[in-house]
């Protein structure tokens, strides 16, 4: 699979099969993704991977917290508002899913809460003193992880919902207090039959996105 094929094959997988991904494959993917660029090669990411019982314990703690109405808290806060155009696209995403899936809102919430049934989650952290410039580096790392996984026939799910109880992650994965838990990427084999995985998010036409001059 070449890069272009990987770019077009990758999509958010919201339901995984229970098959495990082996440790060597995860390490291979992380080794590939380490080639991502970063500001002055600072490589500001710290990576924590949970599979098997470790992931089950984390997910159970999330489920317990949710049941007990423990408020979620992100290390990197959610935006309080979005620009109108971004808001519209978010609405389009949910209405697009609703056309394909009954009770889409409920199912969406359930799958997020159950970590999409993924066998493995990769959690990305960075030092709390770093700025949004390092978030850029973590973004480059994230896409590199997802493309490297795609090349191996694996599916991925980038999700903020995976990190909404950072204290659970800190205690279960021995993440030190100087690190912000930034993001989670679930990884495994897609359940292709699941209705949620039939959805394909659209993109804006490039003529709307980019201003290009000097090629007339
Ligand atoms: C930073 C970030 C956070 C996301 N958080 C969630 C999430 O919590 N739950 C979810 O279902 N999808 C989440 N997504 C997935 C996006 O909704 C998805 O990438 C987007 O709709 C485009 O679809 P595609 O990845 O299939 O191309 C997140 C994606 C990113 C990049």
Image (tube, helix red, strand yellow):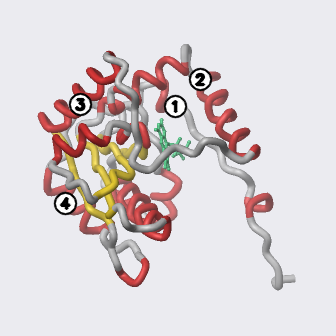
Whether tag 4 and tag 3 are in contact, CB under 8 A, the answer is: no
Residue 152 drawn at (x, y percent): 30, 55
Q: Quadrant of the C terminus?
A: bottom right
Please give the residue where the numbered disc 2 appears in the rendered image: 100
Q: Which mark is residue 198?
A: 1
Vertical order, 138 against 8 (above or below): below
Closest to the observer: 91 or 7?
91
Tell me the residue at 29%/68% (across/down). 32
Identity of the residue drawn at 40% across and 63% down = 138
Mark 3: give few (<14), some (14-19) or many (20+) Cα within 10 Å: some
Sequence-wise, which precedes: disc 3 or disc 2? 3
Q: Are marks 4 and 2 in contact (CB under 8 Å)?
A: no
Q: Earlier in the sequence, mark 4 or mark 3?
A: 3
Do callouts 2 and 1 mark residues in contact (Cβ within 8 Å)?
yes
Q: CA distance from mark 3 to mark 1?
A: 18 Å
The residues tagged by marks 2 and 1 sit, at their Cα atoms, a distance apart of: 8 Å
Dot 4 or dot 2, earlier in sequence: 4
Residue that badge 4 annotates: 27
* 88 to 129, vertically: above or below: above
Going from N to C along the chain, the mark reached first, 4 or 1, is 4
Question: At 48% across and 51% down in the image, what residue appears?
Answer: 9
Circle 3 is placed at which residue position? Answer: 18
Image quarter of residue 90: top right
Crowd class of label 2 (few under 14; some 14 to 19; many from 20; radius 10 Å): some
The local crowd at label 1, few if under 14, some if 14 to 19, many if 20 or more residues have their Cα within 10 Å, is some
The percent position of residue 203, horizontal first and vertical second, equals 66, 49
Q: Secondary structure at mark 3?
A: loop
């Amino acid at each position: 699979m070449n890069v272009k094929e990987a770019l077009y094959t990758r999509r958010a997988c919201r339901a995984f099969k229970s098959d495990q991904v082996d440790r060597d494959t995860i390490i291979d993917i992380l080794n590939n993704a380490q080639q991502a660029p970063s500001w002055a090669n600072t490589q500001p990411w710290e990576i924590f991977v949970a599979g098997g019982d470790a992931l089950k314990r984390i997910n159970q703690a999330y489920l317990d917290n949710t049941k007990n109405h423990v408020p979620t808290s992100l290390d990197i806060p959610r935006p309080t508002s979005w620009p109108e155009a971004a808001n519209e696209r978010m609405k389009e995403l949910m209405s697009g899913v609703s056309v394909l899936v009954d009770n889409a809102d409920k199912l969406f919430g359930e799958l997020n809460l159950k970590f999409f049934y993924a066998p493995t989650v990769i959690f990305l952290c960075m030092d709390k003193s770093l700025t949004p410039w390092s978030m850029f580096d973590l973004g480059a790392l994230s896409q590199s992880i997802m493309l490297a996984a795609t090349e191996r026939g694996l599916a991925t799910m980038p999700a903020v919902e995976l990190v909404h109880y950072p204290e659970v992650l800190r205690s279960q994965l021995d993440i030190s207090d100087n690190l912000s838990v930034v993001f989670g990427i679930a990884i495994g084999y897609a359940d292709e039959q699941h209705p949620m995985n039939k959805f394909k998010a659209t993109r804006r036409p490039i003529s709307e996105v980019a201003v290009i001059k000097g090629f007339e």
